[in-house]
Amino acid sequence: MNEGYSRLSIPPVSVDPAVSPDLISIQDEIRSHFGWKLDADSRSATELWEACENSNQSSTIWSEQSRLQTLFRLQEKLISRPITVLGAAAEVEDVQAAIQEGHGLIAADGAVGILTETEVPAVAWDALQCVVSDADGDPSHLRMAAERGIPFFLHAHGDNIPEWTNFLQVLSQNNTPLILTHQTPGDIVGMHNPGGFTDGDRAVCIALSLNVSPSQLTLRGFRTDIIGRWTGATVPERKMRKLEWMERVLDIAGVKM
C-alpha cells in the first residue's frame, strides 16, 4: 500500500475504523441476534472482490490507483465542509435545508431517489459526494447516480449477491468510481470494513473513517419509528429491529440522530 501512495504521489488516506473497535464488534452481535452466519458475509465479500479482480470491464474502476484517488478526493471534499447523511426516510425539505446550509450530501442507498424530487435537481446532484449502497435500493435511482460518476461504496453481505452482481455491471458500464466494503472481522485486501450495519449508519462510519468529525455530520431521514419510503425490499418486523441496531451503532459512533 505504501508503494501505491508513492506511485500516485498522494498522501495516505485513512480508511480504517479508528473511531471505535466497537463499530466492528457490534457486527458479530447483530449476526448473532438475527441468526446470520459469518460464512455468508465472508462468501459475499470474497465473491465481490473476485468479480472486480477478474472482470476486464471493471478493471479501470477497480485498479489500485483508481481506488486510492477516489478515497483521497472524497476525503478532501468531505473534511472541508459540513455533511448531511440522507437516510431512508429523507424528504425534499431535508435536502433543501442541507443545501441552504452549504452541506455536502451522502446518500444511503435508495435515499438518493429524493434528489429527483427537489425543486432544482441539478443543484442537489452537485452537492452529492457519494452513495453508500448494498444495491437493494431503486435501481433506476442508483443508476442515475452511477451515470453521473458519483462515487459508490458498494457493500457485500450474506444475502445480496444477486443485487451487487447486477449493479456492478451498471457501475462498470459507466466507469463509476468504486470502493468495496464488507462486514467481516478479518482483513480483505482491497476492501474496507468501516463498521456499522445498515446503509445509513455505515454511511456515517465511512465518513468518520475518512476523518470527518462527528460534529460535521447532520443526519436527515433517519427514523426508528417508521420504515422510510426509500428502503429497499424488506420484511417490516425485521426491518424495525434493524433500525434499533442502527441507533445503537450511531450511539457508538457518537453521532446524534
Image (tube, rainbow, N blue to C red):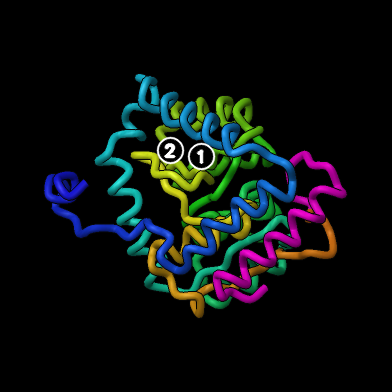
Q: Which amino acid does label 1 sit on?
A: Ala
Range of residues picked out in magenta: 229-257
Residue 209 image point, x, y percent: 42, 62
Q: In this view, does 17 lie above or below 187?
A: below
- Measured as percent of width and height from the top left, residue 68 is found at 29, 47
Mark 1, Cα crowd under 10 Å, few <14 / some 14-19 / many 20+, is: many
Whether residue 252 appears in magenta in the rendering, the answer is yes
Looking at the image, which residue sits at the far right?
237
Q: Residue at x 50, y 66 (%)?
A: 104
Nearer to us in this view, 66 or 29: 29
Q: What residue is pinned by disc 1?
A: 146
Of 161 and 108, nearer the camera is 161
Structural distance between the alpha carbons of marks 2 and 1: 6 Å
| Residues packed near mark 2 inside 10 Å, few (<14), some (14 to 19) or many (20 plus) | many
- Relative to 78, does residue 125 appear above or below in the rendering? above
Give coordinates of residue 161: x percent, y percent: 60, 28
Q: Is mark 2 on a helix, strand or loop?
A: loop
Amino acid carrying label 2: it is: Thr
Please state, as top left, top right, bottom left or bottom right, where the C terminus lies in the image: bottom right
> Mark number for residue 176?
2
Residue depicted at x 51% and y 69%: 83
Left or right of 234? Residue 7 is left
User: Sequence-wise, which precedes: disc 2 or disc 1?
Assistant: 1
Near-viewer residue (173 or 25): 25
Front-lying residue, 210 or 124: 210
The picture places residue 48, in percent across and down from the top left corner, at: 48, 30
Question: CB atoms at circles 2 and 1 under 8 Å apart?
Answer: yes
Instruction: Check disc 1 and report its element: helix, strand or loop.
Output: helix
Q: In this view, does 192 lie to the left or right of 236?
A: left
Residue pictured at 65% horizontal, 54% vertical: 29
Q: Is residue 105 visible?
A: no
**What secondary structure characterizes most of the magenta part?**
helix
